[in-house]
Image (spheres, rainbow, N blue to C red):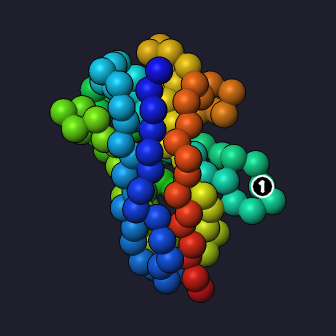
Amino acid sequence: QVQLVESGGGLVQAGGSLRLSCAASGRTFNIYAMGWFRQAPGKEREFVATISRSGGSPFYADSVKGRYTISRDNAKNTVHLQMNSLKPEDTAVYYCAVGKNRLVVATTTQEVGSWGQGTQVTVSS
């Protein structure tokens, strides 16, 4: 099991940037693809981005493509989400996630095996 703790959320004006981090515990961090999801008030949790075990093959939701960048550092057991050109509609609680097993690259909530506690991102207009 991988335990996940997010950090880096906050309040930013539209057009600004934030960088989220997710610290993972467990010796097997580097065998899992990692991802980020978000949940806005009154909406379902949705996929944002994922990255493969090696740090390659990043994949993004259309809504964030070109603005967000996911990366990971397996030596430090961390995954990051750089968010640029933020919009008010990006306001949500952002969750770090890992797939149910090492073969899963989670792009739906059903495929996620572990969640972090979430970090709030608020973008003001």
Q: Which residue sits at x=36%, y=31%?
A: 25
Specify the quadrant that holds the C terminus. bottom right
**Residue 77 location in percent, x, y?**
28, 35
Q: Is residue 93 left or right of residue 34?
A: right
Indicate the quadrant where residue 2 lies.
Answer: top left
Q: Which residue sits at x=45%, y=38%?
A: 4
**Residue 88 location in percent, x, y?**
61, 75
Relative depth, front residue between 16 and 80: 80
**Residue 67 location in percent, x, y?**
43, 61
Tell me the amino acid under the disc marked 1: Lys
Q: Is disc 1 placed on a helix, strand or loop?
A: loop
Q: Does residue 4 lie above or below 119 as drawn? A: above
Q: Which residue sits at x=47%, y=21%?
A: 1
**Residue 50 location in percent, x, y?**
46, 37
For the image shown, how many numbered marks are present on the structure?
1
Relative depth, front residue between 58 and 122: 122
Q: Does residue 68 lie above or below 53 as drawn? A: below
Q: Is residue 108 left or right of residue 94?
A: right
Q: Does residue 114 lie above or below 41 as drawn? A: above
Q: Which residue sits at x=51%, y=36%?
A: 97
From this viewpoint, is residue 61 visible?
no
From this viewpoint, is residue 119 visible?
yes
Indicate the quadrant where residue 20 lies.
Answer: bottom left
In the picture of the structure, the residue carrying the numbered disc 1 is 43
Q: Is residue 77 left or right of residue 33?
A: left
